[in-house]
């Protein structure tokens, strides 16, 4: 006794498995090893009439008309129309086509080009072969593929159903290639540094942790590239960059994914101004690479043509709050009382447990950046929030650092790199103590990140400019996408079982 399919979709899947087995039993392989393909689908439409072609792709549209049919097949390059007629194929081949080929299957076609009465370049098929039988039907018939959860969990279906999604990822690849060209034209060398590390320095973030059984030691997935790169600068590599994945065991939202792509670069004998100029060039060239000068992003029209606005924080602080920024600074720290007073006056909500840096960030992001939507490069940060930057000559309370923002979201971060090992050691010690205090731990026993890095600095590092750019956020901007999940092929998602448990609570 056969079991009745649970759904109509289950029935179709079962039927197609049966059909594939029947073809095999008849000596017809529905999954052959090879097909002849002389042209991509889109290329065929550029050929003169009567040109003989062989191409292949997924059958995406089919219109049967008795003894003839029109169809479209699609590969990565695009679509081309086929004219399939019994008179051209022969009765046996045409019968096989009607019985065994369906939308979703991959087919190989041979024929010659002609132009239909409607003016469309078309392949008049002289042979048509099944080269991969699709067991599941095309997604739009059953899913619609508008449900974002389905789209992100089953990206292959999203790409089949929504051609504009493919275009986003093509643009992503072009953007990354443009960055490489820009840097390599300037003499930068692409390098690779460890993903598994004993320490997770270079940023303040929670790492993913693992354990190496053979070495009997804990390891962490990297959260930044900085400390290894500056070792290479110490070792004599003057211009380096790396584009790679970072991993941070933190929250997920429209701009954060636990696994993301970062580009970091370092230039010996450069500084923060060198980096600001280079940032403009990288973004401008990437925009050109995908053919855009302006883009709609978060409801705003963004002009991507350099130069970008440069916002000097001390000047903006004075203009916005009517006070010198040094009134809330005390060397490498903030003065809590005047900073808290200013935050309260500006309507910033905070608690006594919130660190000073959080208050500064709130003031900066909600007040100083207000009104800036197009790219803005903010320079001259407080030393208190910049442990790896060199201080400005004559002003130890400010550092040579910039962050780049669009519509309030950060795109890049750059420094004149700190190369004084004693200063760096003290700043790391202060940072670790502050972190320990915030977590209720003993500040005296706070872990100072990466002593090996301090040792490397003791060998001497030339004046250096360094910069990091979030590739995912840059792609979001240049393609006008509001969610990071739209520009990552396979974003991190909560398991379906966990979602079901939450729904049942």
Image (cartoon, rainbow, N blue to C red):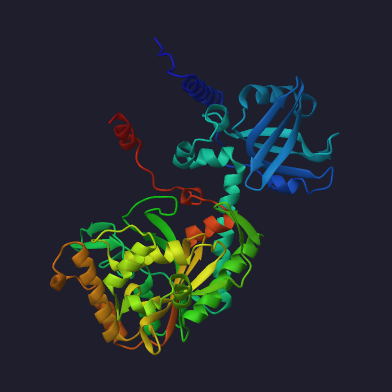
Looking at the image, can residue 417 be seen?
A: no
**Is residue 172 toward the left or the right of residue 396 in the image?**
right
Quarter of the image where one finds residue 346: bottom left
Looking at the image, can residue 124 be seen?
A: yes
**Is residue 33 toward the left or the right of residue 81 in the image?**
left
**Is residue 299 toward the left or the right of residue 484 in the image?**
right
Residue 367 x %, y %: 45, 64
Residue at the location (47% across, 48% down)?
Answer: 485
> Is residue 418 or residue 315 the one in the foreground?
315
**Is residue 470 toward the left or the right of residue 170 in the image?**
left
Residue 54 x %, y %: 71, 43
Q: Is residue 119 above or below residue 201?
A: above
Residue 154 x %, y %: 47, 39
Residue 198 x %, y %: 25, 67
Q: Quadrant of the N terminus?
A: top left
Task: Give the total of numbered labels.
Answer: 0
Residue at the location (44% across, 17% down)?
Answer: 5
């Amino acid at each position: 006794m056969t079991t009745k399919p649970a759904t109509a979709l289950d029935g179709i899947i079962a039927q197609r498995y049966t059909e594939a087995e029947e073809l095999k039993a008849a000596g017809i392989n529905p999954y052959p090893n090879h097909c002849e393909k002389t042209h991509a689908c889109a290329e065929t439409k550029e050929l003169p009439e009567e040109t003989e072609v062989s191409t292949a792709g997924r059958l995406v549209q089919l219109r049967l008309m008795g003894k003839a049919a029109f169809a479209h097949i699609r590969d990565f390059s695009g679509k081309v129309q086929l004219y399939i007629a019994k008179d051209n194929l022969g009765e046996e081949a045409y019968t096989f086509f009607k019985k065994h080929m369906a939308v979703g299957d991959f087919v190989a076609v041979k024929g010659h080009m002609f132009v239909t009465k409607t003016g469309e370049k078309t392949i008049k098929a002289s042979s048509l072969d099944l080269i991969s039988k699709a067991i599941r039907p095309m997604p739009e018939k059953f899913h619609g593929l508008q449900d974002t959860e389905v789209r992100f969990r089953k990206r292959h279906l999203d790409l089949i159903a929504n051609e504009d999604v493919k275009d986003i990822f093509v643009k992503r690849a072009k953007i990354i290639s443009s960055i490489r060209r820009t840097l390599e034209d300037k003499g930068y060398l692409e390098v690779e540094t460890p993903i598994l590390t004993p320490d997770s320095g270079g940023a303040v973030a929670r790492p993913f942790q693992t354990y190496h059984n053979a070495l009997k030691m804990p390891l962490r997935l990297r959260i930044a590239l900085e400390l290894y790169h500056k070792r290479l600068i110490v070792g004599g590599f003057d211009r380096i960059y790396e584009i790679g994945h970072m991993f941070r065991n933190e929250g997920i939202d429209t701009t954060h994914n636990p696994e993301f792509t970062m580009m970091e670069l370092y230039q010996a004998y450069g500084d923060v101004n060198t980096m600001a100029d280079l940032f403009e060039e990288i973004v401008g060239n990437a925009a050109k690479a995908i053919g855009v000068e302006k883009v709609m992003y978060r409801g705003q029209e963004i002009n991507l043509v350099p130069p970008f606005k440069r916002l000097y924080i001390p000047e903006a602080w004075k203009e916005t709050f009517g006070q010198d920024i040094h009134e809330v600074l005390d060397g490498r720290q903030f003065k809590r009382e005047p900073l808290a007073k200013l935050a309260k006056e500006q309507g910033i909500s905070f608690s006594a447990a919130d660190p000073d840096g959080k208050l500064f960030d709130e003031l900066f992001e909600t007040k100083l950046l207000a009104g800036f939507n197009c790219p803005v490069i903010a320079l001259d940060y407080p030393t208190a929030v910049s442990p790896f930057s060199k201080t400005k000559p004559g002003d130890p309370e400010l550092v040579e650092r910039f962050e780049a923002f669009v519509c309030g979201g950060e795109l890049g971060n750059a420094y004149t790199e700190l190369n004084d090992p004693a200063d760096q050691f003290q700043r790391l010690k202060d940072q670790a103590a502050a972190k320990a205090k915030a977590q209720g731990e003993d500040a005296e026993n706070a872990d100072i990140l990466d002593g090996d890095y301090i040792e490397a600095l003791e060998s001497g590092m030339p004046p250096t400019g360094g910069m990091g750019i979030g590739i995912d956020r840059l792609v979001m901007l240049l393609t006008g996408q509001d969610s990071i999940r739209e520009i990552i092929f396979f974003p991190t998602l909560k398991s379906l079982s966990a979602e079901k448990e939450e729904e049942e609570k």
